Amino acid sequence: MASNMYHKEKSIQMKSSASALYNNLSVLRIAPRSLTYFTVVHANMVNMVSASWDGLNYSHRQLQSKEANVATSSSLIMQAAWCVLPSRDILVLTSQKGIQMYESDGSIMVYWHALDTPETQTAQAVFARGIAAVREKYICVGISSGSMLVFDVPIKGSNITLSEVLEEHKESITDLASECSGSLECIADMVSADDSGNLCVWKSGEDFQLLNKIPGFDMSCSSVKLWKGTVVAGYGTGQIRLYEAVTGIVHAEVNAHARWIYSLDIAPFSGLLLSAAEDSLVRVWHLTMTPETNSVEIVHMYNECVTDTQICGAKFCDGDGYAFAVTGYDLSEIIRYTQV
Amino acid sequence: MSMRTLPLVFINLGGEMLYILDQRLQTQNTADDNTQKGVWSDDDRKRVMNDIIATMFSKAFMEELLKPQDLYSNRALRTVLTRLAHASIMRLNPASMDRLYELMVMAFKYQLLLCPRPRDLLIISYNHIDAIREFVRDTPSVLNQVDETHRKIIEVYTPLSDGEFQLLRQTLLIFLQDMHVRVSLFLKDKVQNPNGRFALSTTGPVPHGTEVPGLIRMFSGNGKEWKRWEFPTGGSYTSSIRVGSFERFGDRVSRIGTNMYSVTQPEETHTSKNYSQKANSEPNPLAKEELNLLARLLGGMKVQNRNTETGFRVNLFATDQEEEEAGASGANGDQSFQVINIQATQDVQVNTELARIAGEFTGEPEQTESPEGPSNKGDDLLAMMDEL
């Protein structure tokens, strides 16, 4: 392990602290403008910071969850994530009340989908969680019931429509991920995870097709990624598992963290994997595919301990994994690290 | 988010409140000051504890809490907890209630953060219930209520999945976000840093169900392990210890949620705020819906009519002189440890009290109680134990 692989950079200050939610950091790199956007959820609000690459300019925006002020019905936001589509980038917010979609810089809301709330209060919480852009034109969002909504997104404009509802999971959706290698050869386009650790592997299209169901072991899978046909799943037990998406074959099992994993990310060009958990640790791993033997190898590269912090978000800032950013519960800063 | 937070919130926050009150009220007995007019006897203390516990664990109250619903707003929770604290003859003024609330909340926040697995929030709750049971062991009727409630909690919460418990925990953590009040007991034990944040350890046993980090295992297509190796973890973990009992009785194993306060350490209930932090503001008044919920909840609590009794005014945390000094320096944003005094006074006008709480429902700013005249301050003065 290279103990000096990364070093800490100057943190970015936010207007408010990060909430303890899975995958609570989203990063969007805008190369033409030499900017990176960061979004972090705080209760019923999203902090959006845009940082110029020269480190000189920062601007802040805060987005409210819709219907946050109706009576006392708080609408807590569960997740905020960028969906990168060929012609546009959409910022998606999922909350207790519904799904909000914004254009690029968060200035215009282009779509609102209200969740069905039951007439009488049930013990089952209602919320949306799990966001992924799939192939060229879809945005998928998970629901607490286990359903998943597939939205069809046009090249421009607000004519976003609900294309399909996928009913496969029986437990609350925790995270969604689309194939991020950029390769068109991969059969599987998306993986969905739920609170019992069940994983579903999908092929996108007019009608999404379920390719495989990988059973869980009664432990929540809080974060999931899909890269070169390999599912990388992080669990509440602190374990990371690598599966072959289409067959469900287990490639590897890592006793990675001592507490609940909150975030996973992959740098698609280099195969670096980032994992972060409530145990205050961020770990960097390297994945190597060996097509001949159809195996995936995972090697540990680096550890970073964010003292006294339960980490809730960790993302690479670029496709090579040259830099990554971290958020923690109750922290009002986005901590950044870059390779030495 | 989670619809099941309230019962656990009240058991744990209420439990912490009882620990603090119990310690503070016992401290009164050991006062050396001979100018005390009245004596806060053991019986009086037990009476206060019994009254609060009886109200908290009353069938009506618990039934209301157990209904699936969103977590109350900060303001609503404060209101109900204040009413609970006043379920007996003891009265606390708003400033005192503030400090008591801070202590309760910071303790609960600490417990939530340290909770090894989300499900262990139940162990923490049961530790509180076990202690509460001890407080009322001589009062069979109240003890019975506590037992009944415990049974109900076990019934409701045992079937929840780990994911649902984590959602519950996340909901509570959002509620407690940005609270960094420093508590001298925590600072002394080094579980809290001077900046108000809790120290999280990277050593010790892993939670039950988690493996000690460090192992990577590779599998071939047929499921056989073909390679394993270790990686450096940067922490120092050991195997998990046995699981505590989730039944009504039994060894809970974990000490989280047990009584941190003891009679011999009265100074540990000092709190100090970082005054530069912005206050938690809630501009929106309670909505009609929440108001109705609260009314039902409070309606289930028996109102103690104390009009005819002589007052029991308790200085929970400091002498009057120290209080005046503290009051003077408080406004200066002094960040050194101050003696934060909880002044408990008799409230002869229960109706005024209720009216004040009712005023909070409509979103009016909290009215401070009318200042005590000098003559009142001299009466029933019970000395404080705190040294500083």
Image (tube, grey):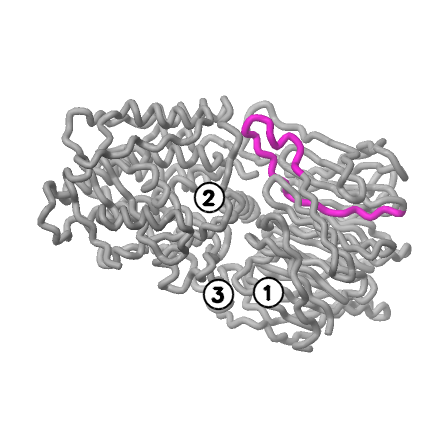
Looking at the rendering, the stretch of residues picked out in magenta corresponds to A64-86
Residue at x 82% of width, y 48% of height:
A84
Q: Type of residue at label 2? A: Thr
Q: Are circles 2 and 3 on residues that touch, CB within 8 Å? A: no
Q: Position of residue A204 (x, y in %)?
A: 84, 44
* Magenta residues, dominant SS class: loop
| Sequence-first disc among 2 and 3 | 2
Foreground: disc 2 or disc 3: 3
- Chain to which the residue tagged by mark 2 belongs: B
Q: Which mark is residue A281?
A: 1
Residue A300 in view: no
Foreground: disc 2 or disc 1: 1
Asked which secondary structure carries label 1, the reply is strand
Q: Quadrant of the image for the N terminus of chain A?
A: bottom right
Q: Position of residue B342 (x, y in %)?
A: 29, 44
Q: Type of residue at label 1? A: Leu
Seen from the viewer's position, the closer of residues B55 and B126 is B55
- Would you name the residue on which mark 3 appears? B201
Asked which secondary structure carries label 2, the reply is loop
Q: Type of residue at label 3? A: Ser
Q: Badge 3: few (under 14), some or many (20 or more) residues near its Cα, within 10 Å?
A: some
Residue at x 44% of width, y 54% of height:
B110
- Chain to which the residue tagged by mark 1 belongs: A
Q: Position of residue B230 (x, y in %)?
A: 63, 75
Seen from the viewer's position, the closer of residues A160 and B231 is A160
Q: Which mark is residue B86?
A: none
> What's the distance in space between the residues labelled 2 and 1, CA to CA?
30 Å
Asked which secondary structure carries label 3, the reply is loop
- Whether marks 2 and 3 lie on the same chain: yes
Figure check: A1 above or below B99: below
- Chain to which the residue tagged by mark 3 belongs: B
- Would you name the residue on which mark 2 appears? B158
